Amino acid sequence: MKKTIALTLASVLGLSACVSPEVVTRTNAGDRNLSCAEIEHQLHQLDEIRAEAQKGRSVSGTNVAAAILFWPAVIGNHANATQALEAANERNEVLVKLASEKRCKI
């Protein structure tokens, strides 16, 4: 019984340590209608998403705890963080190109 409780607690703590950065889409239907201010705002949001994703790829206290308590969480963190970074970088390229086409000063 004590083993089950300890295992359950370790699993819950491990899962709660997971970093889940948002995975954005490369393009959106209304991209052509974005104003320069909206493009700039979305670029700032991408910076925040990238920062959150980097946490999932780095050696941090959270990731070390996850590795000790629930090692599959580390694999999930890294995979999700990598996917989020790639998606954010692709979205960034689209927004920068759009800003250039609209001659935005970003």
Image (cartoon, rainbow, N blue to C red):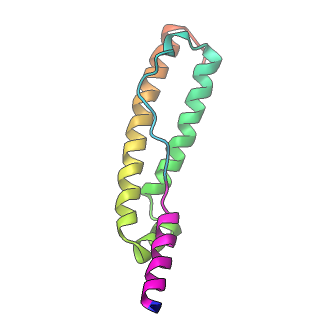
Question: In this view of the protein, which residue sits in the foreground, 28 or 95?
Answer: 28
Q: Which corner quadrant holds the C terminus?
A: top right
Q: Main secondary structure of the magenta part?
A: helix
Find residue 80 and report its horizontal and vertical position in percent: 39, 50
Residue at 53% across / 47% down in the picture? Answer: 51
Find residue 71 and report its horizontal and vertical position in percent: 37, 71
Q: To which quarter of the image does residue 34 belong? A: top right
Up the image or down, 83 lies above or below 92; here it is: below
Answer with left or right where residue 12 lies relative to residue 90.
right
Would you say residue 60 is visible in this rendering?
no
Would you say residue 2 is visible in this rendering?
yes
Q: Which corner quadrant holds the N terminus?
A: bottom left
Answer with left or right where residue 67 lies relative to residue 41.
left
Residue at 41% across / 27% down in the picture? Answer: 26
Residue at 47% across / 85% down in the picture? Answer: 6
In this rendering, the count of numbered labels is 0
Residue at 46% across / 77% down in the picture? Answer: 8
Q: To which quarter of the image does residue 76 belong? A: bottom left
Q: Is residue 68 magenta?
A: no
Q: Which residues are magenta?
A: 3-19
Up the image or down, 54 lies above or below 90; here it is: below
